[in-house]
Image: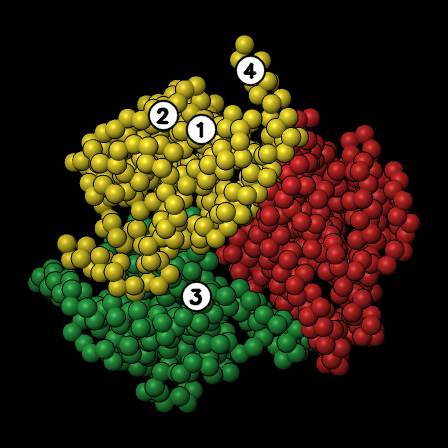
Chain colours: A red, B yellow, C green
Amino acid sequence: MAAATLVRRIGRSGVLPLCCRPPAWDRTPRPPPGLPLAPGRSFSNNKIQVELDESSGVAMMKLKSPPVNSLSLELLTEFAISLEKLENNRACRGVIITSSVPKIFSSGLDITEMCGKSVEHYTEFWRAVQEMWLRLYGSSMVTVAAVNGSSPAGGCLVALSCDYRIMAENPKFSIGLNEAQLGIVAPFWFKDTFVNVVGHRIAERSLQLGSLHPAPEAHKLGLVDELVPEEKLMEKAAAVMAQWLALPDHARQLTKTMMRKPVVDRLVAHREEDIKNFVTFISKESIQKSLRMYMEMLKKRKS
Amino acid sequence: MAAATLVRRIGRSGVLPLCCRPPAWDRTPRPPPGLPLAPGRSFSNNKIQVELDESSGVAMMKLKSPPVNSLSLELLTEFAISLEKLENNRACRGVIITSSVPKIFSSGLDITEMCGKSVEHYTEFWRAVQEMWLRLYGSSMVTVAAVNGSSPAGGCLVALSCDYRIMAENPKFSIGLNEAQLGIVAPFWFKDTFVNVVGHRIAERSLQLGSLHPAPEAHKLGLVDELVPEEKLMEKAAAVMAQWLALPDHARQLTKTMMRKPVVDRLVAHREEDIKNFVTFISKESIQKSLRMYMEMLKKRKS
Amino acid sequence: MAAATLVRRIGRSGVLPLCCRPPAWDRTPRPPPGLPLAPGRSFSNNKIQVELDESSGVAMMKLKSPPVNSLSLELLTEFAISLEKLENNRACRGVIITSSVPKIFSSGLDITEMCGKSVEHYTEFWRAVQEMWLRLYGSSMVTVAAVNGSSPAGGCLVALSCDYRIMAENPKFSIGLNEAQLGIVAPFWFKDTFVNVVGHRIAERSLQLGSLHPAPEAHKLGLVDELVPEEKLMEKAAAVMAQWLALPDHARQLTKTMMRKPVVDRLVAHREEDIKNFVTFISKESIQKSLRMYMEMLKKRKS
């Protein structure tokens, strides 16, 4: 109790000038409130199911957007709003993020959001990608990724942005920022997040090769912290969460901010520029053509 | 000899603009000279015993402040002065830092210095903490930590600031920046020092959890460089020191400065601000109350 | 093909503001074109032999300057020009760098270039060292070092600047930035390159000790990516190259630029200053004397 008081004062007193101000990204425009913000024990959106266990203070966020949990505008918006609701709920101290779709955690950004839409739509979409990351990477809650399936590109980013990553030890599941395989380039803030987890050298090689690392390799590289048999994944995630929640919140939060603020600030400082660049790029007819061809190929594969 | 001349010239010529200037922290006010500065073969203060073997050029600095070598204002001041004396003694090229108290290297900052004292005292105390780190982390001598006991918080910082860390392989001894466990936050320069040793990811996790790592785990994480049986610790420290001293001093010193200067400069640039923040924080009645409660608890534990 | 188009657009559109501009170092004066720039299947200079396999798009660059492939002004100039020729040859996508001298990859900078010459000569030499590194570290081609012998100092820098390092697993071959052993200090851009490969802690220790790491140790530290029996080195290098070339060029190139640009930019920003410092340093009579003594010693050793 003394410790809790102590740390609460640190937060207010500004003893750590580098990390005590309210996070800068929290002063940027928020996504439109499509859902009621009143906190509740559980709420289910279209694409994400959230259950909060008020006794433990731990929420479970399940991505449920079959077939592959692709990060559509709708899912991203629900993601950011769900995080905001939990962040504002004093009963919630930690979030476990997982998938309710078998074999896949998330397949990354939804390509259909980037094809045949208006400039306004692209702008909204990219802002939602940024917003999701800013809220997740900068969350004051403990965030644990229970990676129960493959997790390429944007899916990998979600996992990388958590405080801890546990993955099912199935070597058929892979994870990585494989954008280069598709001929595209991970944005600088994906890269910064990756470097903060695996270091410069592994990031340089993995990003250039667009590597998707099977679970055992991902663990060896430090991309995930732990592997467990799939059936023990949720149990382990709960145990890890309990370990992190044993710490006084404020000290942990300020420490997290101190570690992550430089990378968060970099996107915040270049956010509008980053959106503008994305929209200019994606609006080109040549890119649109490429994307249409890619989607055709995906459709043929399905049928 | 040619090599030695060569490197001496590098020092003077400024061929390396990033690292040749006299270190910036050396232009800050020094601690009051409470002890005679005349170099001698050995000198014993109240809290630290120093023995210099002039034949090898190696000094042994033993912390001797039972029961737990807590870093009081007196010990910190003696620490900085001892380092300065050795630094100014041309016969001294390296320092081995160890403890003469069984089972403990150092327990970290002395909480009694932060409780019930004047603003002037807090100011003096925090400046002494900074000064110790600036002198140790930026020392031009080879510094080897012979960690012969547990070493939490500020004790861990002392070890992290050396060039090399050898620890007794006793799994009962642990080491780490565990400030978060106490509800407080490691200052940014503790964090920078830690990141430079173990990298961003391990630092992020360990700082948030306030982990105290048993010796074998600390070795695995890279927090210490080597484990040896306790009875071989000093012998090993001497051997490591001899290896480092086989290099020409100036080349090694300039290289060390090149590696550490950015982190040293960061505190130097924010030193007064860092002191002011600490003093404001620690002077609050709520914090003082918390500290009094904590000390009560420690007293009860003892009796 | 869609992917290739996609990524080509990224390059032109500037969607990644941090990495899309033509590299800054490409706007600095180029080395005098001592050789015809017309691309050809193979060309042999005095010190370097280059063979381009147009079917695979892979060039083999062999250093052939016995007895130790020291990096003379001539070799460095040929190195930079060869890289430029290949870079401008659309048929070339990757370069394997190796040595045709038994047991040595490269012994580093040629000391005779720094001794008894004019200020103009020193200026030209140091600019050539910088130019080689800027072209190699910033190359848009895939660069693989097939390290078939020892590789101290500048030789190690060549390997560190490639995208991937394979070394013959002979423990008699060693590699490292051992400048400190000779009483000199690795320039800051050698250090930056090293830190990007092995991280801060390993670099700090290795640079201060001037360590030459035997191949197995170099592999353990991450200084080289892979060890193979010497007779399989070229085969393995070709296999690794094929793996890297399986990626669309533009995405890989932009990713590489994103990772390496900060370090390249740092030298570009301080290039003239770096030259001036080197020339001032090396022109001193005391340094010249040291170098003459060192060369005498080398001559005696030979005879």
Q: Name the residue under label 3.
A: C162
Q: Mark 2 lies on which chain?
A: B
Q: What secondary structure is marked by label 2?
A: loop
Asked whether the beta carbons under mark 2 and mark 4 sit within 8 Å of each other, the answer is: no
Looking at the image, residue B227 sits to the left or right of residue B186; the answer is: left
Q: Mark 2 points at which residue?
A: B47
Q: What secondary structure is marked by label 3?
A: loop
Which class describes the residues within 10 Å of circle 3: few (<14), some (14-19), or many (20+)? many
Q: Distance between the residues labelled 1 and 4?
A: 18 Å
**Residue type indicated by callout 2:** Lys
Q: How far apart are marks 2 and 4 (CA)?
A: 22 Å
Q: Earlier in the sequence, mark 2 or mark 1?
A: 2
**Residue at x 39%, y 48% (from the top left corner):** B28
- Residue B235 visible? The answer is no
Q: Earlier in the sequence, mark 1 or mark 4?
A: 1
**Residue type indicated by callout 4:** Lys
From what the image shows, is residue C114 above or below residue B265? below
Q: Mark 4 points at which residue?
A: B299
Asked whether the beta carbons under mark 3 and mark 1 sit within 8 Å of each other, the answer is: no
Q: Distance between the residues labelled 4 and 3?
A: 60 Å
Mark in the foreground, 3 or 2: 2
